[in-house]
Amino acid sequence: MRFSNFLYSGYEFNEDEDLLRFKFKMINSILLIIAFFTTLFATISDLGIHDIGHVQAIMNYITAAFMIILVFFLRHSKDNYPKVSNILILAMSMTFTMALISVPQDEFRLIWFHLLVFVAYVLNGSRNGLIFTLLSIGIILTTHFLMDLQLSQIAINTGIISLIIASFLFHVYTNKVSSYENALQEKNASLEVLASTDGLTGIMNKRIFNEVSERYFYTAQRHEKELTLLLLDLDHFKKINDTYGHKIGDHLLIRFVESIQTILRKSDVFARIGGEEFAVLLFKTDEEGAKDLAEKIRLAVEQIVIICQNKEISVTTSIGITANTVDDEGFTDIFTRSDKALYTAKESGRNQICFIS
């Protein structure tokens, strides 16, 4: 396994999870870094190179082992991220508090709380960062008040002031990153809507309909459920466009869609798959139910009237219907039969429905 994949806990992330991908990489890196350096400091202390005390050395070994456990716990599920990040930050705060108390020979140990605040901001956002900023300041002041940390008041004051400044900078940075992420998600959502809907009528376009219909088909075949397809075509629509212009034609298409939407159920799939050709996909609807719906649509379309040049313009629709069979190998088989039924309806005089089984 590549190391970069290891840092992502072996997960795949979609385009909407860029920030989560970054957080997984950060948290795994932090866990490994903490495990390595806590072990290193404990080892060199045991060797007498850099004494941090026996208690702190044991605490370091425990912390290192705990970090490795968290690395593998994170690999069980993406949903474990909040738990692991909170546990990590709490463990860091405990370790740094122990170092503050038990390693008086380290005059610069207050700096570790800056790392704690940074990790809180990066992994869990501004609110968590502010909480651990206040907690860190509280720990420093409380321990300084209760025991001799062998740190001057100037060192304590400087440590707290620098923590506040660092927290402010981390807060500004984290909020900016979050705002960029939110803006990007909104933009991606808008682009996805634009890519999946017909620009004129606002209903599903052909590309998405093809994807959805395939999923519906395999679900229906697997569970032995009815899947019925209605193909609708506006009769003599080209003549209307040529006579009155595309603006009137577009207005007619919009009225056509609005009329049908008032009849369909929320579960029905309605899409524009061509210039004046539309499709309605019905799940768990038998032949009689499909015919009844098609007739309601046909009658509703007959009622559409728009005025242009003091003339009333009306339109009718032809509808081809078919349902899935056990012999169908793909949705294409259903579409082909429905298209044939539509052709029959138009050849038979238009403004009518035709069912082919």
Image: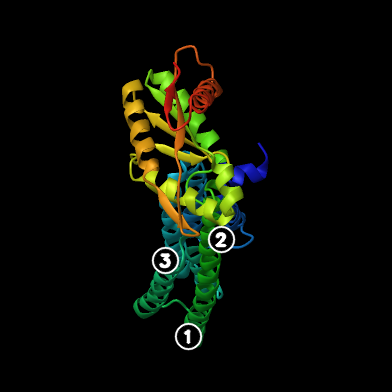
- 224 or 271: nearer the viewer: 271
Please tell me which residue is depicted at 46% across the width and 70% down the height of the picture.
100
- Asked where in the image residue 211 lies, by quadrant, the reply is top right
Label 3 secondary element: helix
Amino acid tagged 2: Leu
Q: Which of marks 1 and 3 is in front?
A: 3
Rendered-image quadrant of the N terminus:
top right
Please tell me which residue is depicted at 34% across the width and 77% down the height of the picture.
146
Q: Earlier in the sequence, mark 1 or mark 3?
A: 3
Inter-mark Cα distance, 2 to 1: 41 Å
Whether residue 149 is visible, yes or no, is: yes
Mark 2 and mark 1 in contact? Answer it, CB < 8 Å. no
Which label sits on residue 128?
A: 3
Q: How crowded is mark 3: few (under 14 residues within 10 Å), some or many (20 or more)?
A: some
Question: Disc 2 marks which residue?
Answer: 184
Q: Residue furthest right?
A: 2
Amino acid tagged 1: Asn
Query: Residue 87: percent from the left, percent from the top?
Result: 42, 54
Whether residue 16 is visible, yes or no, is: no
Inter-mark Cα distance, 3 to 2: 23 Å
Label 2 secondary element: helix
Question: Disc 1 marks which residue?
Answer: 157
Q: Earlier in the sequence, mark 3 or mark 2?
A: 3
Query: Residue 270: percent from the left, percent from the top?
Result: 44, 39
Q: Residue furthest front?
A: 310
Mark 1 and mark 3 in contact? Answer it, CB < 8 Å. no
